[in-house]
Image (spheres, rainbow, N blue to C red):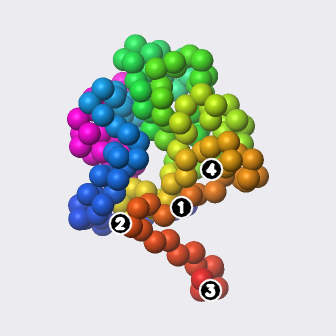
């Protein structure tokens, strides 16, 4: 869509970051690859929950965008958690990144092919959230049951202590 300017205060960060760190099971032994541009609200995913947990932030070199370069970066640094978009994940092969235990994707639709490729190898989480909601509002852990139940990946369920309302274009809920 068209770019938009949204003011988001830091007031929503603790309610998002603390449960995110807990849900990901982040600990001081984790190494999380920070790949997002600072202009993308999701870049906070690779910073705030990671620091709260005492995990290490590995900053991805700006020239590394995907494919073999990204696989080598993940492998070289022993990255355990990757937060990325499905488009970038599509350029990677699960066998080439054995240190990964968890992959969090968001920002665009997660295809059935990626689900089938990655879900057996890592804990895969699909997150969704408009910028106005402090990064992410819904999530779903991609399990075998989810793969079998849905033809298309749902955006997930509200995060802890949250609510989500769906409003149709005509104003109906």
Q: Are marks 2 and 3 in contact (CB under 8 Å)?
A: no
What residue is rendered at 48% in x and 29% in y? 101
Which residue carries the number 2 mark? 6
- Between disc 1 and disc 4, whose residue precedes? 4
- 32 relative to 105, above or below: above
Q: Position of residue 6 (x, y in %)?
A: 35, 66
Query: Can residue 51 be found in the magenta stretch?
Result: yes
Query: Can residue 109 be found in the magenta stretch?
Result: no
Which residue carries the number 4 mark? 109
- Between disc 2 and disc 3, whose residue precedes? 2
- Between disc 2 and disc 1, whose residue precedes? 2
Which residue carries the number 3 mark? 172
* Front residue of this view, candidates 96 and 34: 96
Viewer-nearest of discs 4 and 2: 4
| Crowdedness near tag 2: few (<14), some (14–19) or many (≥20) residues, C-alpha within 10 Å | few
Q: Are marks 1 and 4 in contact (CB under 8 Å)?
A: no
Residue 62 seen by the camera? no
- 168 relative to 54, above or below: below
Which residue carries the number 1 mark? 157
What residue is rendered at 39% in x and 67% in y? 161
Which region shows up in magenta? 41-63
Q: Quadrant of residue 33?
A: top left
Label 4 secondary element: loop
Q: Position of residue 69 (x, y in %)?
A: 49, 18
Label 3 secondary element: loop
- Between disc 3 and disc 1, whose residue precedes? 1
What residue is rendered at 53% in x and 36% in y? 123
């Amino acid at each position: 869509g068209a770019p938009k300017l949204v003011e988001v205060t830091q007031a929503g960060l603790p309610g998002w970051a603390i449960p995110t760190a807990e849900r990901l099971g982040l600990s001081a032994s984790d190494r999380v690859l920070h790949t997002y541009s600072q202009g993308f609200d999701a870049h906070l995913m690779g910073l705030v929950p990671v620091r709260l947990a005492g995990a290490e932030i590995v900053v991805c070199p700006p020239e590394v965008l995907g494919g073999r370069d990204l696989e080598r970066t993940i492998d070289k640094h022993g990255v355990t958690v990757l937060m990325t978009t499905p488009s970038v994940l599509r350029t990677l092969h699960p066998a080439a990144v054995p240190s990964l235990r968890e992959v969090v994707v968001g920002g665009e639709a997660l295809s059935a092919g990626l689900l089938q490729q990655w879900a057996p190898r890592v804990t895969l989480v699909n997150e969704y959230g408009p910028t106005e909601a402090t990064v992410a509002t819904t999530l779903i852990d991609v399990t075998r049951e989810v793969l079998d139940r849905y033809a298309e990946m749902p955006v997930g369920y509200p995060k802890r202590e949250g609510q989500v309302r769906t409003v149709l274009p005509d104003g109906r809920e």
